[in-house]
């Protein structure tokens, strides 16, 4: 297969400005130099050269140094970047292959992203990112790779340059975050649109140049000075997880209900509460010393090891079982956390045995990865169900073999970005100033169904006939009236989700059990005939309810690496046409997932395709103002709630 990006030599200029106030502007500029102390020159798009094969590049063979210049009112400094060609080849190879696989998916459900990453390249520099638990002076743990559109001159250059009427003007095509130190997953997140997180963060530094940029996880970034003080942050501020949570981190919580359920599956109450950090310094200390975060990092590193082993060509052991027969494995070890990565295709029945190991009954010929935990840590194998009779190759026939490779990804969507509610947190003195990401995500979920014709799915007041009888959820929050409609729902959801306010900031935190109860509290007036104690439901009496049918499947844990409990429910829901709320990071942020991407790593042996591994990402509407969707690794999901709503009865005028 011909590589999509034959040369990593594209160099362009990106000049962005943000009004900090009416009198102050911060300018961002990428620059390059041949030696460390300059002279520095702006990277100009006019230097692009068009090649015979249609690609565009500018030679950077002699360029070894890049920087990100930050200026304010004529003053400022520069943040050093890393030259892409000086990086470990494997890291660049992983990123390049990822871009290529998405760009080639032109005939799939992923065509929207494919179009964005067609004719793009990786910028010749990378922004180094530090892990929050890194020692002072440590090497970067991650790289942010900026993706840019190729721009080509007409040849020969005479008069005007080439112009395309549909050109959006911006060369930004998103970013990829890749891991360097192998204690984290190879591809962590990406977006095919807009600026990078580091660019957004740098616009908030008020002209000060950070000594380092720290990536805490999928939804929180920090710019620090040389002493480790906070200059700016981007994303959702983490809340402090009680250290006693370490004793409950192995617990999984789940439920499934619909309109026929007589008893709802309420979540387990942990009895623990999130707390805000009183300062950025307190966050850093807790991050390094908390037994919760230490255990989370350990589990994360185990998952990362599995994926990096595959990138390095290390093949997992194959466990064989015959169709309709059973076989037992690892009988000498206590097995926990077993997941057959089959996505409900019916390959086999797997039972963990109390005496040790697990038993497999083959139900369908094929293969799938299986992961499980023993005293030695996470184990990764391949389960193969073989036919009762294995027929040899005929005379003169040759085995059809292929080396391990990632297949083109499969992608499923519930609509597109244009079908989502582009809402964000609103401010109110009755809240934590901001309403909270949990209520915002739930409101966007109900708003989605309201906009799909379920007029009672979203309401600003359960005793408002107009709200229950009309699909009134706006897509944007551009006007005072639109914000007023959404604000009414926010009030109820903020209260029902028991949002924990941060006295040191503007945001609030929501425990997963409180988010689940917030969901049930919101749908109760429109889906149930009676209140929980058996009393008549006033909404049903007033408007001829129950007004809606519903289905919900939810699960959460505290690992962020348990695909089987939480992420799989949202993935199944997306395949069936249901968006879902996902919790990202470690009890940090909630958003609405409406896209799911799965990619298999396979090899062929004697004509048999063997699935070695699966990687997954969710496309998430994060509920951030002036921001588009982002793809996050499914191992960053700690909560999944998949729900659908349909109109059951037409509301009657009371």
Image: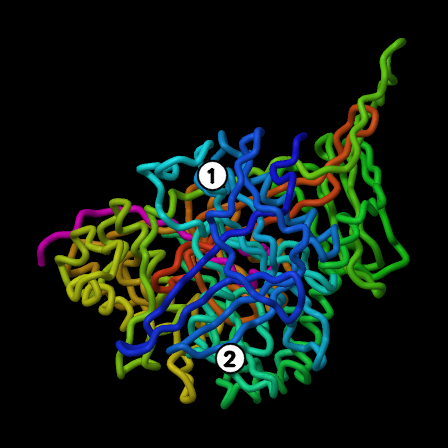
Give the answer, above or below, for where 110 lies relative to 442.
Answer: above
Q: In the rendered structure, which disc, 1 or 2, sits on the residue that comes first in sequence?
A: 1
**Residue beneath disc 2:** 239
Q: Is residue 642 magenta?
A: yes
Q: Write the residue at 27% across / 62% down.
A: 525
Q: How is the image coloured?
A: rainbow
Residue 21 image point, x, y percent: 30, 77
Structural distance between the alpha carbons of marks 1 and 2: 47 Å
Q: Nearer the viewer, residue 454 or 40?
A: 40
Q: Nearer the viewer, residue 348 or 443?
A: 443
Part of the protein shown in magenta: 631-654
Left or right: 290 with respect to 524? right
Confirm whether residue 538 shows in the render: no
Outermost residue, front direction? 158
Residue 529 image point, x, y percent: 27, 58
Q: Is residue 643 magenta?
A: yes
Q: Which mark is residue 152?
A: 1
Q: Secondary structure at mark 2?
A: loop
- Of the 4 image quadrants, the one containing the N terminus is top right
Residue 280 image point, x, y percent: 53, 85
Give the answer, above or below, for where 479 lies relative to 121.
Answer: below
Q: Write the residue at 60% across / 84% down.
A: 226
Q: Quadrant of residue 317?
A: top right
């Amino acid at each position: 297969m011909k590589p999509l990006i034959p040369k990593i030599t594209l160099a362009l200029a990106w000049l962005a400005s943000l009004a900090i106030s009416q009198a102050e502007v911060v300018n961002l500029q990428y620059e390059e130099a041949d030696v460390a102390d300059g002279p520095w020159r702006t990277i100009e798009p006019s230097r692009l050269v068009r090649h015979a094969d249609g690609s565009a590049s500018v030679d950077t063979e002699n360029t070894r140094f890049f920087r990100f210049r930050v200026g304010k009112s004529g003053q400022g400094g520069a943040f050093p970047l890393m030259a892409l060609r000086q990086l470990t080849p494997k890291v660049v190879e992983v990123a390049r292959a990822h871009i290529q696989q998405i760009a080639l998916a032109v005939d799939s459900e992923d065509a929207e992203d494919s179009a964005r990453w067609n004719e793009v390249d990786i910028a010749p520099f990378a922004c180094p990112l530090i892990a929050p638990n890194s020692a002072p002076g440590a090497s970067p743990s991650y790289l942010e790779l900026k993706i840019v559109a190729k721009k080509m001159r007409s040849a020969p250059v005479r008069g005007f340059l080439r112009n395309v009427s549909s050109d959006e003007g911006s060369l930004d095509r998103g970013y990829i975050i890749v891991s360097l130190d192998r204690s984290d997953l190879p591809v962590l997140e990406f977006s095919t649109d807009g600026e990078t997180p580091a660019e957004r963060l740098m616009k908030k530094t008020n002209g000060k140049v950070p000594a380092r940029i720290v990536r805490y996880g999928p939804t929180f970034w920090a710019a620090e000075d040389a002493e480790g003080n906070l200059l700016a942050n981007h994303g959702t501020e983490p809340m402090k997880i009680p250290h006693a949570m370490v004793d409950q981190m192995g617990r999984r919580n789940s439920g499934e209900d619909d309109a026929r359920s007589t008893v709802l599956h309420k979540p387990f109450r942990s009895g623990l509460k999130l707390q805000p950090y009183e300062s950025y310094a307190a966050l850093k200390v807790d991050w390094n010393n908390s037994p919760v975060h230490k255990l989370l990092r350990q589990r994360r590193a185990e998952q990362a090891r599995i994926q990096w082993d595959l990138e390095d060509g290390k093949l997992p052991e194959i466990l064989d079982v015959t169709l309709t027969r059973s076989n037992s494995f690892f009988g000498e070890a206590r097995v926990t956390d077993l997941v057959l990565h089959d996505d409900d295709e019916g390959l086999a029945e797997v039972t963990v045995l109390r005496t040790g190991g697990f038993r497999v009954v083959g139900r369908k010929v094929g293969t799938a990865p299986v992961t499980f935990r023993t005293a030695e840590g996470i184990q990764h194998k391949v389960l193969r169900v073989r036919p009762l009779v294995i027929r040899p190759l005929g005379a003169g026939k040759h085995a059809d073999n292929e080396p391990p490779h990632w297949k083109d990804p499969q992608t499923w969507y519930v609509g597109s970005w244009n079908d989502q509610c582009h809402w964000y947190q609103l401010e109110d003195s009755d809240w934590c100033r901001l309403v909270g990401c949990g209520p915002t995500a739930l409101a966007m979920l109900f708003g989605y169904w309201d906009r799909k014709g379920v007029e009672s799915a979203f309401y600003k007041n359960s005793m408002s006939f107009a709200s229950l009888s009309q699909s009134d959820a706006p897509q944007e929050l551009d006007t005072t009236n639109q914000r007023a409609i959404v604000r009414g729902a926010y009030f109820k959801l903020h209260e029902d989700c028991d949002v924990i306010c941060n006295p040191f900031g503007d945001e609030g935190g929501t425990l997963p059990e409180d988010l689940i109860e917030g969901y049930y509290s919101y749908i109760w007036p429109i889906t149930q005939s009676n209140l929980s104690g058996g009393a008549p439901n006033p909404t049903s009496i007033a408007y001829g309810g129950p007004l809606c049918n519903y289905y919900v499947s939810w699960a959460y844990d505290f690992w962020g690496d348990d695909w089987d409990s939480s992420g799989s429910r949202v993935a199944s829901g997306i395949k069936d046409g249901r968006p879902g709320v996902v919790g990202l990071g470690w009890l940090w942020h909630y958003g609405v997932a409406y896209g799911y991407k799965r990619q298999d790593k396979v090899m062929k042996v004697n004509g048999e395709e063997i699935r070695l591994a699966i990687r997954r990402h969710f496309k998430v509407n994060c509920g951030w103002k002036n921001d588009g969707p982002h793809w996050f690794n499914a191992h960053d999901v700690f909560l999944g709630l998949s729900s659908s709503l349909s109109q059951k009865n037409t509301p009657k005028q009371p």
